[in-house]
Structures are given as structure tokens and as C-alpha cells.
Image (cartoon, coloured by chain):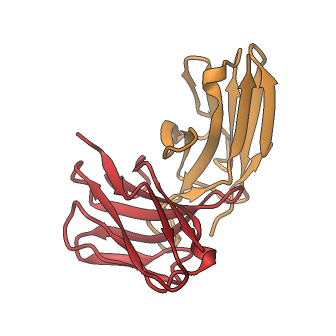
Chain colours: A orange, B red
Amino acid sequence: TQLLEQSPQFLSIQEGENLTVYCNSSSVFSSLQWYRQEPGEGPVLLVTVVTGGEVKKLKRLTFQFGDARKDSSLHITAAQPGDTGLYLCAGANLQNSNSGYALNFGKGTSLLVTP
Amino acid sequence: NAGVTQTPKFRILKIGQSMTLQCAQDMNHNYMYWYRQDPGMGLKLIYYSVGAGITDKGEVPNGYNVSRSTTEDFPLRLELAAPSQTSVYFCASSYGRGYEQYFGPGTRLTVT
């Protein structure tokens, strides 16, 4: 199993603040996905990054894939209460046939944005 | 499209009882997965399937069984339920390996 470490584990901020969460591994991934999970629901995909150094923006969310494709970050600008949720990163290694057919998920960062 | 559906939403089992968690998808995905999610532990893969008639173990398969007789359905069977199986169970499907996974709403299971 290729481990993905997410930090911080918990984050509580005020509306309007900026934040960055991290997803790190010692393994190289073919692609990395970010999901958001709201209480009582399943995770929903936010973005997939594939190329080393790639930056993708989704409104106030900016995702970056590390140059070596071992790590990723999610930056939220001017956080809003609607951003509250569990943010999960998940890596796929399509080069390794022994890695199985599923994604390797990190444990997640639980974000609370208060008004 | 309904996407991925799961039933039941909640269930309480006594130790030693058995049950089947149902999962269905209407996206014609070949790949389907079962995960369990425990607080602070992320998602752990129980079983997966790459097509009808083909299943394989994930990271934590003990105490569970699956079958995949059709593309649409991927039920998860718990035999002799134990307290350690108290968790939230998610079914997911994807177009292929490494593609976006679509998750169901989850089944919250308590074994007492």
C-alpha cells in the first residue's frame, strides 16, 4: 500500500481566511485526485491532477501537483462556511500492476469554516 | 441517472447476525468498489470488481464476501457480524482504473 499523508488533520478557521492543506507521499503517482466529503454523504471529486507541476483552479480552490508527482496541495482563498467538509486526496499508480485497481486514499483533512 | 445507490442507509446488527449491503450503479461502469470508513482512518478498500464475474480482495477483506453477477450490482455480504465491523460502508464505481470514482451515500452499520 502506498501511503498518502494529509496535513493538518483538523483545521478550524473563520470565514474569509485563506488555508492550505497538504497531501504527501514517498511514492510517485500517475495521477492524484482531491475529493470533498460532507457529513452523511459520500466523497465527491473536486479535481484530478496528472502532470508534475500542474496547477488547476476551481473558483476559490487552487490545486497543485508536485513536480515529482509525490505530493499535492489544496489552497482555498477567502474560505466560506460552505467549504466545510472532509478533504481527501487519493493517488493512482497505473504503472504498478501490483497496486490494485483502486485509489489509495489519505486519511483526510477535516475543515470547519465558521461565520 | 441515479448514479450509485446503496441500501439500507442505517442498520443495527447483533453480534453473529448476517446481512447484505446492496449497491447498484446505472452508469455502465465496469469497476466497482467497497470501502469502509472509520473516524480518522480514511477509506479502506474491502473488495473490488473489474467486471461482472470478477472480484478481488482489497486491503481489509476478512469477514466480508462479494459477488458481481451483473454490471450494475455489487452486493457486500457480512457473515457473523462482529463489533469491529461497526463502520460506514461506501460503494463506488468508476469507468476504469485510476478514473474518478463515484460514491454512493453510504450505509452506517452498528454491530452490538
Asked which quadrant contains residue B112, the reply is: bottom right
Pick the residue in front: B9 or B26. B9
Q: Residue B110 at x, y = what percent? A: 56, 66
Number of labels in the image equals: 0
Q: Going by the image, does B25 lie left or right of B14?
A: left
| Horizontal side of residue B73 vs A30, given as left or right | left
- In the figure, A55 relative to B109: above or below? above
Q: With respect to residue A34, does B44 lie above or below?
A: below
The residue under the point 68% across, 62% down is A3
Q: In the figure, B46 relative to B28: above or below?
A: below
Residue A24 placement, left or right of B29: right
Front position in the image: A52 or A93: A93
Residue A18, percent across and down?
77, 20
Image spot of residue A88 (x, y percent) = 62, 45
Q: Splitting the image into 4 quarters, where does residue B30 fall?
A: bottom left
Camera-side residue of B106 and B14: B14
Q: Which residue is depicted at the point 63% across and 40% down?
A: A87
Identify which residue is drawn at 66% across, 21% down: A81
Q: Is residue B104 above or below residue A46?
A: below
Q: Quadrant of the N terminus of chain B?
A: top left
Task: Please name the residue shown 70% across and 27% down the image.
Answer: A75
Seen from the viewer's position, the closer of residues A26 and A3 is A3
